[in-house]
Image (cartoon, helix red, strand yellow):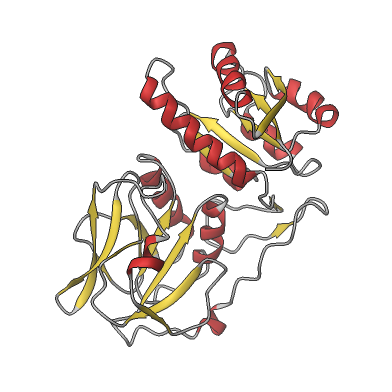
Amino acid sequence: MDQKIRIMVVDDSILFRNWLVQSLGSDPRFEIVGYAVNAYDAKNKVPLLKPDLLTLDIEMPGMSGLEFLKEFLPTHPIPVILVSSLNMRVFDALAAGAVDFVRKPDLENKVGKTTFLNMLKAKVVIGAKARVQIPVTHNTSAPRAGSLRPASAACTAPSEIPSRSRLNISTADPGRIIAIGASTGGTEAILQVLRDLPPTLPGIVITQHMPAGFTSMYAERLNRLCRMEVREAKHGDKVQPGLALLAPGGLQMRVVRIGNGYGVSCSQDEKVNGHCPLWMCSLILCRFTPVRKPLALFSQAWAPTAQPDCCV
């Protein structure tokens, strides 16, 4: 890497903040340009320090990380990676413009800290190049398409999502499956794709790189906002029209033949390239024939040419 990624750490816990600053700062790819003890401190320091990326806690006294994102990102579109505990506010923060998240580790658990750092560093490298999208409106009570706008020239407009009339995919062929995979920034992108899709589409399998515990909450959120049913996949679930199955965190999900149709197998296989669940395996291990144009940048409709047995 020719130029170091300039990082600013925002966290009210002095113990965790100092550890994170030291841990990230020891990596030659990164430069810690500063830290903030709360959201107000961050608002003052970001314009002066001009970091490439922020790590941000959500639960902070005074102004929360979520409130900070809503107020600050429209005028300062900086990639933000959430470093927080497990709760539903993570998804609200992602909807407000954060590009990714990592669950806070137990500082007394050496293995957990190492896993956390490896994951965070990988997300920092990717997240620093992410396109920050700021929602103009976001209605979390009813399923409708939300609009996004770039906050400045640094934020590119989101890719056009095909309308239902242009998808032209029917449920007549039981062998057809739609597969969607995403990583950094994918949570809101997947929502944008699924939100307005009709419940008559073929079955959908989804992999979003996400730790155990988060996938069930994410599936519940998608299910509330989308027209089709969305749920976290369980071993043996059938892939059927109108249903989207999200790969559970911590497990690898495979598409397998079940009778005349297809289903999913969820197992505790080893991580591949650090990921579990994994998306890219499907492009390597499966023989699929593309039958339609991509639904979006990261999704494709497929008809298996042979009995599939693949990670998605």
Give whichever of 153, 197 is nearer the camera. 153
Q: Residue at x 65, y 46 (%)?
A: 97
Name the residue furthest right: 48
Residue 9: image location, x then y, percent: 65, 25
Side (left or right) of 62 relative to 195: right
Side (left or right) of 174 relative to 101: left
Give whichever of 168, 209 is nearer the camera. 209
Q: Classify 283 as above or below 50.
A: below
Residue 228: image location, x then y, percent: 41, 66
Q: How many marks?
A: 0
Q: Quadrant of the C terminus?
A: bottom left
- Quarter where residue 65 is shown: top right
Residue 234: image location, x then y, percent: 24, 54
Give whichever of 148, 156 is nearer the camera. 156
Q: Residue at x 29, y 57 (%)?
A: 253
| Residue 182 visible, this orientation | yes
Side (left or right) of 5 relative to 309: right
- Quarter where residue 169 is shown: bottom left
Q: Residue at x 53, y 54 (%)?
A: 186
Q: Quadrant of the N terminus?
A: top right
Q: Classify 309 as above or below 115.
A: below
Name the residue furthest left: 259
